[in-house]
Amino acid sequence: MTEQNIIMEDAEPSAEELFEPTQMLRKLEADWKPIDTELLERVPISQLEVMPDLFQPREMSQKHIEDLRRAIKTAGVLDAMLVLPVGKRLIVIDGHHRMEAYKWAEVVIPVPVSYFKGEPREALFEAGRCNSKAKLPMENRERQNYAWKLVLLAQGSKADVSGASGISPSQVAIMRRVFKSLGEDAYSYSSWTRALRASSGTIATLDPDQLEEWKEAMAMEWADKLAKGFSTKMAKNPEVAAKALYHYFGRQLPLLVDELRGMIATDYGDLDGVEDDNPYF
């Protein structure tokens, strides 16, 4: 055995190679071929496969599944799920909640499907786009985490990642910088917020762009928590929401007002003219 062979045998796989979604994607790409035959418009649930680590940007909502289950009891079947044919496998890229609802409803008849004709890497972006415009849209945190996953998978341009996840191209650029700064440790973080924190060490060491991105990530996370806790109650009752914030912030309230004034001025211009032109003021 030559010295070169010994070195090759001793070389350990990189973190990218060990990253499970990367392994899944490479296996799909190796097995994938363009569709050249007619495929059934309805297939049994047992023939469908899910790969949530690749194609499920959102967390599963039990309430949404239950709503769909009730719809199945009434209508029999739901809208077609989008699937990716890979060899003999049919992998769901959009319709995970429908799939789960069919199982809960113990549906045994074949269900409607439509077929994605692109390659597996293209299916990643299609899954994100479908979930961004779905009736149960992705939360901000889910958008960020899905974009971060696409960065880890080294897939697509900034515009591709932005379009699939719903975050801005500038946020994607910052994610790529964080990925580069973390190196192989980046694959240890499935959460974008945690990856951002890990890349900076402490908030005090953040550069201006990273600091702004950290603030935005935290704000979106808190906004999601408010939405989960209050649904649309705060948005529909701004006076009550204002009173709640008044009591919550106490002496810190003037600081909040200053921040809000700055944001409103950026989005709407002079605050004095907003009340006349905008029905929300």
Image (cartoon, rainbow, N blue to C red):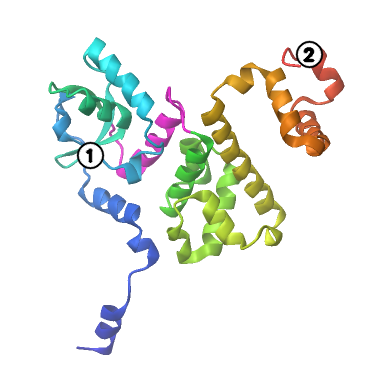
Could you tell whether 251 is left or right of 233 in the image? right
Q: Secondary structure at mark 1?
A: loop
Q: Residue at x 37, y 24 (%)?
A: 64
Q: Which residue is mark 2?
A: 277
Instruction: Of the two numbered discs 2 and 1 on the same chain, state the one appearing first in sequence.
Output: 1
> Looking at numbered disc 2 in the image, what kind of residue is underneath it?
Asp
Residue bounds of the magenta highlight: 116-138
Q: Is residue 206 visible?
A: yes
* Number of dots carrying numbers: 2
Residue 14 pos. (x, y %): 37, 68
Residue 102 pos. (x, y %): 22, 25
Q: Is residue 79 magenta?
A: no
Q: Residue at x 29, y 80 (%)?
A: 10
As displayed, is residue 84 above or below residue 113? below
As displayed, is residue 46 above or below residue 170? above
Circle on res. 34 = 1
> Among all residues in the image, which is located at the extreme right?
272
Residue 39 pos. (x, y %): 16, 28
Q: Nearer the viewer, residue 248 or 190?
A: 248
Q: Is residue 41 visible?
A: no
Q: Residue at x 56, y 21 (%)?
A: 232
Mark 2: few/some/many CA within 10 Å (<14, 14-19, 20+): few
Q: Secondary structure at mark 2?
A: helix
**Label 2 with label 1: CB-CB less than 8 Å:** no
Residue 185 pos. (x, y %): 47, 64
Q: CA distance from mark 2 to mark 1?
A: 54 Å
